[in-house]
Amino acid sequence: MKYLSYIFIFIFILISTEKLWSEGDYIFYPESKHKFDFTQNIGIGIVILPRSVFEDAFSQIPILNYNARLDLPFNLILSGKFSTILFSNNLSTGILWNYKYHNFNLGAFTELGLWYGFYNSEGIDLGSRGWTFFPGVVVAYNFKDVYLTIKFNLMYQSQVTVAGENRIGKTFNGYTGYSVSIISEQNFLDNSVFSLELKLNYTTFHNITWLSYSTFDNLILYPELTFGIKL
């Protein structure tokens, strides 16, 4: 866990000296832009899976993320996200209301999504699916040379796993934990907008682990580190 923090701090300092891009190029910062302004971002993330879930070793799984944002009237922001590692896929949408006070921005949001996983190999046909519901709050600050956003949300999820037409493994619906995210956005290599997110998931279930058949009911830490570029 410590080395993830070092990576985050190092990259944050390394690019913090870059000149700020034109105002309004952010995608995660919770400040309203022009009405119906549309912004996109694509990123690569790494999810750290703990030893208690995969007993042989700590596992690092790369994940592809696509984010989209549409600014609406009345300080509302509509967001969408798709993430995939092939055998586990997540599609979600959310709505955020924000309020600006000097260089601070405060907001409340909710995200609703669906996820689906599958595995077909050597006669084994498995599938898993569920929904996600993440209500939360956000606080952010404009440092002029970097936009910094901190998010906190509760996690409500479901899971159903099947082999053919038969349900197997753990099935549940409801509260599974919470997550905290720190996101920085700033100019990178003159013309690109770079984002860096460190997300700490404290949860009894992470959908990319559905193949592990985990039966843990206690909160486990799943760190995520995601690098993104605005399209």
Image (cartoon, helix red, strand yellow):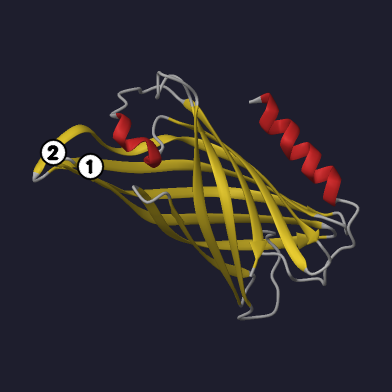
Q: Residues within 10 Å of mark 1 (few under 14, many from 20)?
A: some
Query: Residue placed farthest to the front in the image?
Result: 122
Using the image as rendered, state which of residue 174 and residue 227 is in the foreground: 227
The picture quadrant where one finds residue 199 is top right
Check if mark 1's residue and mark 2's residue have beta carbons within 8 Å. yes
**Image x and y of residue 65, in percent:** 52, 56
Residue occupying image coordinates x 60% and y 63%: 97
Residue at the spot of label 2: 167
Residue at the spot of label 1: 160
What type is the residue that disc 2 sits on?
Arg
Q: Residues within 10 Å of mark 2 (few under 14, many from 20)?
A: some
Using the image as rendered, state which of residue 26 and residue 2 is in the foreground: 2
The picture quadrant where one finds residue 67 is bottom right
Left or right: 228 as drawn, with respect to 173:
right
Q: Quadrant location of the C terminus?
A: bottom right
Residue occupying image coordinates x 57% and y 51%: 44
What type is the residue that disc 1 sits on?
Val
Is the residue 13 above or below the residue 107 in the image?
above
